[in-house]
Amino acid sequence: MNILEYFDHTEKKQDKEHFIHLIQIALADGVFQETEREMLLRFGRKLGFTAPEIDDLFEATKKSAYIPPYEFSKRFGQLYDVVKMVYADGKIDNNEMRLATGIALKSGFVEQELPVLLALLINGIKNGEDEDDLFDLYKKRRIVR
């Protein structure tokens, strides 16, 4: 572990873990495509990571404890990113969906609502819908309140 990682604030640690999840999704089908790499780089920059930090996270092989964000909207946003990565190559692989489901559960989404939530995200991403619009729609359709 890099000494500077001890000084990362919680949100930075959450962002790193989220990015590692996105990398795992990209690798889950055994084929790392250029579209997935480009999307990962965009996500990394969006999260505020430098190029060396992104490279380090690509190389990270250790498991760390996942600390999901407290805010419901951020947890939804992270799951949106995960599903977007699942669909980055235009296909949905069973291994990728298994990982996405596990991440959703770790993020605090209830198992009974996952089929509805994941279908909403997949269809929304396929149709080019905005994350905020999907979040609003999900809040209206939510099973567990």
Image (spheres, rainbow, N blue to C red):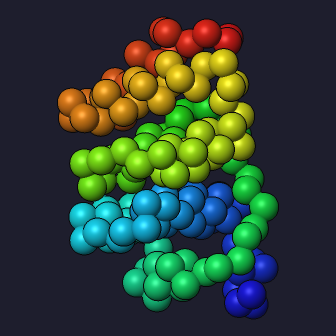
With respect to residue 41, does 58 lie above or below?
below
User: Which quadrant of the structure image shows residue 41?
Assistant: bottom left
Residue 21 visible to an observer of this rendering = yes
Residue name at image x 48 percent, y 9 percent = 140
Q: Is residue 130 visible?
A: no
Q: Residue at x 37, y 45 (%)?
A: 92
Quarter in which the C terminus is drawn = top right
**Foreground of the two, 76 or 49:** 76
- Image coords of residue 28 (percent x, y): 49, 61
Image quadrant in which you'd find residue 71: top right
Tell me if 78 is positioned left or right of 33 in this view: right
As rendered, which of 14 and 83 lies closer to the eye? 83
- Residue 16 percent across, percent down from the top left: 59, 66
Q: Is residue 79 left or right of residue 32?
A: right
Image location (x, y in percent) of residue 107: 67, 41
Residue at x-position 55% and y-position 84%? 59
